[in-house]
Image (cartoon, coloured by chain):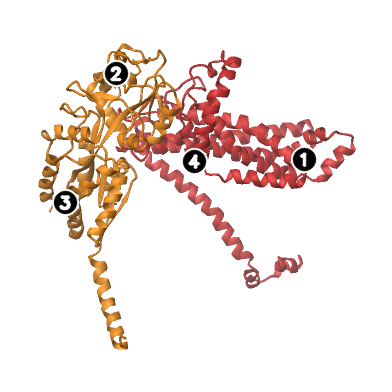
Amino acid sequence: MRVAGSTSPEHAPTTSLRRRLLGGDEIARFIVTAAAAGILIACGLLVYELWVSSGAARHEFGWSFITGRTWDPNAGEFGAWPFVVGTTVTSAIALLIAVPAGVGAAIFLAELAPRRVSDFLAFCIELLAAVPSVIYGLLGVFILVPVMKVLVDGPLKAALGWLPIFSGPFYGVSTLTAGVLLALMVLPFIVSVSRQVLLSVPTEQREAALALGATRWETTWNVVLPYAKRGIYGSAFLALARALGETMAVTMVIGNSPQLQASLLAPGYSIAAVVANEFTEATGDLYVSALIALGLVLFGLTVVINGLARLLVASTSTRATAVQ
Amino acid sequence: MPSTRNVFLLALAAALAFPAASEAQVRLTGAGATFPYPIYSKWFDEYRKVRADVQINYQSIGSGGGIRQVTEGTVDFGATDGPMTEEQLSQFATKRGGAVMHFPTVLGAVVPVYNLPAVTAQLRFTSAALAGIYLGTITKWNDPAIASANPGAKLPASDIVVVRRSDGSGTSFVWTDYLSKVSADWKAKVGANTAVNWPVGLGGKGNEGVAGLVKQTAGSIGYIELVYALQNKMAFGRVQNPAGEFVAASLSSVTAAASGAAANMPADFRVSITNAPGKAAYPIASFTWLLIPTQQAEPAKQRAITDFLKWMLADGQKLAEPLGYAPLPKAVVTKELQQLSKLK
C-alpha cells in the first residue's frame, strides 16, 4: 500500500519492471491470476471427468436418462427423473421458507436491533452456518420428524388437505420434511449475507428518506431494500447452491423412495442422496456410470437453475430501472 | 557403564538391523464390506500380536468398492457380503490376470423388526408373508397371511409401513436373495442385489437408519443385521424355514444354516445359504467373504495372506462369537483349509 501510495500517477508509466517486481504488483498479479485460473481448471476437469466416466450410461440411454422414471439397478434400467424432481422441489420449498424468513431476520438485525444485539446474534448465526450437515440430519430425525408428525401433519391436512400435494399418509420422513430441514440449513447464509448487505447501505439513503417524511418501515421497504436488492439475491443464490447439493441431511429425512408421487407428504429422493447412498456398493460398469451421470445431471441442473435465477434478477432490475 | 565403543557398536548394529527388519515387514491392504468390519479390525489387531512382521490395513468402503478395488489391483485383497458374479470374475481375469478366490470368514443374518405397540408376543413370519409385505400385496397387519401364523396375537387393522435400506448394502443383498428364493413373483419383478427397485416403502440409511425409522413409526416393519439387533436389544420376529419351523435368529441357528449348506458347498465357496435346509437353520443368513487373488506380485505377500487365513480359520474363529458373529461350521473350515493349500 505504501509503495502504491508513494508512486504518484505521473511517475507510474516510467516505473521500471524491476521496480514493479520489487513492489510486488507483478507477483501479486500472477498469484491471483493463477488462483482464478485454478478454479476454472478444477471446474473444467470436473466436467471432463463426469462426462468421460458417465459414457456408458449416456451411450445406453441418451437423453431419456433424464426423463426416465425407473431406477432399477437389477434390470440395468436407469432414469434420473424422480431424483431431478426431488432435488428441485426440496430446494424450492427451502427457498420459499428461508428467503422471507431470512430477509426478515436480516432487516431486524440491520435496521431495528441495537448494534450490540445485532453483532451478537450475527455471530450466533454464523456459528449455525458452520454446523456440519450430519448434525442437521440428526436434528431432523430426532426433532423435526416428530414435530412434523405431531404438530404439522394434522393442521396442514385440515386446512389444505384437498390439494393433491398435501394428501395421502404421512410417515414423518418426506419431501416436505427435507425441504423444511433445508430451509433451516440455508437460513444462516441468507441472514448473514443479507445483514451485511443491508448494513452497507449508506446512512444518507435512510436519512434522506426520513427527511422526506417517510416512516421507518417505508424507509426500509422503499429505500434500503431496493438499494440492497442485488446482494440479497446473491444470498439467495448461495442458499440455493447449498440446497441443491445437500446430501447427508436430506437423505436422513427424505424417505429415499424413487417412486414419483404428487404429494409432498410422501417420501421422495434427491440426486445427491442417491449417489451417496448407492455409489459404494454399486457393481457393474453401467450402474457406476449411471450414478456418475446423475452427478452430471446435478451439475447441469445447478447451471440451469442458477442461469434462470440470474435471468430473472436481470429482468426484474431492468424493469425496475425502466419504471424509475 | 557401557563404553563409548560399545555404544558405537550398538548404534552400528541397529543401523544394520533396521533396514533388514523393514524389508521383512509385510504390509497388506484390503478394502470392502462394512458388515464384518468390527471382527476384521479385531482380527488384524490380534494378528499383529502373533506376527509382528505383518501389518494389515483394512478400509470398510462397502462390498461393491471392495470388488472394484481388488479388480483394479489397488488393494492386496478385497472383502464382500455377496459373492462376485461370473461377469465380475471374468472382468477380474482380463484386468488383473489369474483368478480370485472366495474365503468365507464369518456368518451374518438379517432379521425382521417391527413396531406394533399392542403386540407383545414374538411375531412369526412365513416366507409368503414377508414377500407379500415387501411386494406391496399385503398391506394390512391383520391380513390372513400374517394372522394365520400368529393365532392369539392382537394384530391391528392398520397399514403396514415398509422400511428398507436406501444405501446399497450386503444386508439388502441377503434379504432380497432370500425373497427371490421363496417368491417367484419377487424374483421376476425385483430380484436380488445390494440395491434394487423397491416396489414399496421408506428408505433408511444404514442399519441405524432402518432401526430408527421402525422405532419412530407405529405399524412399520424393517430388516436389519442380527448383530445390530442383538447389540441394541431390539425385538425381532421368527421366520419360517423350508422345514416348516419358525426359527428365531441366533448365532447357533445361523451356524446351523451354514452346516446345512456345507454338504453341497461348491469348491469356490460362492454359495448362498438363504433358505437353507435343516430343522434348526435360520433361513435369512449369509457368509461374508475375503477375496484373495491367486497371483500376487510379491511372494512375501502371498505367504503372509495364506498364514493369516490359516490363523483366522483356527484362532480367529474364537473371537467371532463375543462380537456377535456366528463362527463357521467345522465342515466349512476343513474345506477352506484344503482350498488354502492350492493357493501356494
Label of residue B310 in the image:
3
Q: Nearer the viewer, mark 4 or mark 1?
A: 4
Residue at mark 4 to residue at mark 1: CA–CA distance: 34 Å
Q: Quadrant of the C terminus of chain A?
A: top right
Q: Tag 1, which chain? A: A
Q: Could you tell whether B5 is left or right of A49 in the image? A: left
* Total labels drawn: 4
Q: Identity of the amino acid at label 2?
A: Ala
For the question of whether residue B314 can be seen, the reply is yes
Residue A211 spot, x, y in % from top left: 89, 39
**Are labels 4 and 3 assigned to the same chain?**
no
**Are labels 2 and 4 assigned to the same chain?**
no
Give the letter of the red chain.
A
Residue A29 spot, x, y in % from top left: 61, 61
Q: Identity of the amino acid at label 1?
A: Glu
Q: Which residue is mark 4?
A: A134
Precedes in sequence: disc 4 or disc 1 = 1
Q: Which residue is mark 1?
A: A111
Residue B62 spot, x, y in % from top left: 33, 42
Say above or below: B243 vs B270: above
Disc 1 element: helix
Q: Nearer the viewer, mark 2 or mark 4?
A: 2
Precedes in sequence: disc 2 or disc 3 = 2
Say above or below: A148 vs B149: below
Label of residue B129 in the image:
2
